[in-house]
Amino acid sequence: MRGMTFAKTLVQLAAAVPALWLGWRIANDLFGADPVAEITHYSGDWALRFLLASLAMTPLRRITGRSEPIRFRRLLGLWAFVYATLHLATYLVLDLGGYWAQIAEDIVKRPFITVGFLAWLLLIPLAVTSTRGMMRRLGRRWGQMHKLVYLIGILAVLHFWWLVKADVREPLIYAAILGLLFLLRWPRNRARSQEKRSALAQSSQPGA
């Protein structure tokens, strides 16, 4: 138990490093000609990285046969929400300056902002229900709700892809990683579907 607490503390500290590094760069004016764009890209990158890391924990548990990776899934997901919120706040405060009419117009008319904002909205209930208490209260519904993270992953990659428009090499890497994570989960999901069909067929037989 102490070992896991220590490991989670290390993960927390490591996850905070990109934010601390960003703050240090801002304090020392170490950005280029377009600091807002750099901050936006930096925070968005880390949000997507932590999101993919959280998605990787379930396949990693199955591959290694150990339960430890799954204990970091919620923690990594929360950090994804932190950096996604920073990403959105940079756009709202630094890019648009709180000009709300323009914000609403961008969400409606610019597809990459639409899907990015939707991904952030879907992260909110997952972040709010990430505590042990909420897991107990929601029971089976908690797992069903948190499957939204796969849709969020797709929306986040799509947001990045549509944002860069021409040079899609970086979002392509993220898309490939996300696709690999889906493939790693597919055999398990297919096995579960087969088990459910078998159980349903047995229960429908006469005398079952």
Image: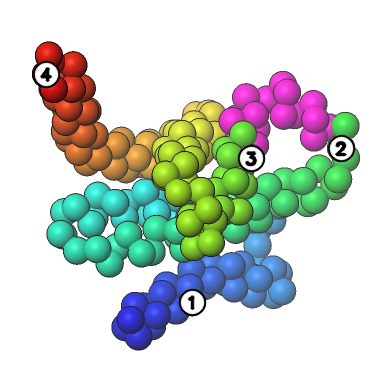
Left or right, 151 with respect to 113, comes to left
**Label 4 close to label 3 by CB (< 8 Å):** no
* Image location of residue 86, percent across then percent down: 66, 55
Residue to which mark 4 is pinned = 207
Residue to which mark 1 is pinned = 13
Residue to which mark 2 is pinned = 100
Q: Residues within 10 Å of mark 2 (few under 14, many from 20)?
A: few
Q: Amino acid at mark 1?
A: Leu
Q: Earlier in the sequence, mark 3 or mark 1?
A: 1
Dot label at residue 205: none
Q: Residue at x 53, y 61 (%)?
A: 133
Above or below, comparing residue 72 to residue 164 in the picture? below
**Label 2 close to label 4 by CB (< 8 Å):** no
Q: Earlier in the sequence, mark 2 or mark 3?
A: 2
Q: Amino acid at mark 2?
A: Trp
Spatial CA span between label 4 and label 3:
49 Å
Residue to which mark 3 is pinned = 121
Above or below, comparing residue 31 to residue 121 in the picture? below
Left or right, 65 with respect to 182, comes to left
Quadrant in which the N terminus is drawn: bottom left
Whether residue 149 is visible here, answered yes or no, is no
Is 155 within the magenta? no
Whether residue 137 is visible here, answered yes or no, is yes
Spatial CA span between label 2 and label 4:
65 Å
Task: Give, as a single range, the part of the protein colored magenta.
Answer: 102-117
Q: Amino acid at mark 3?
A: Leu
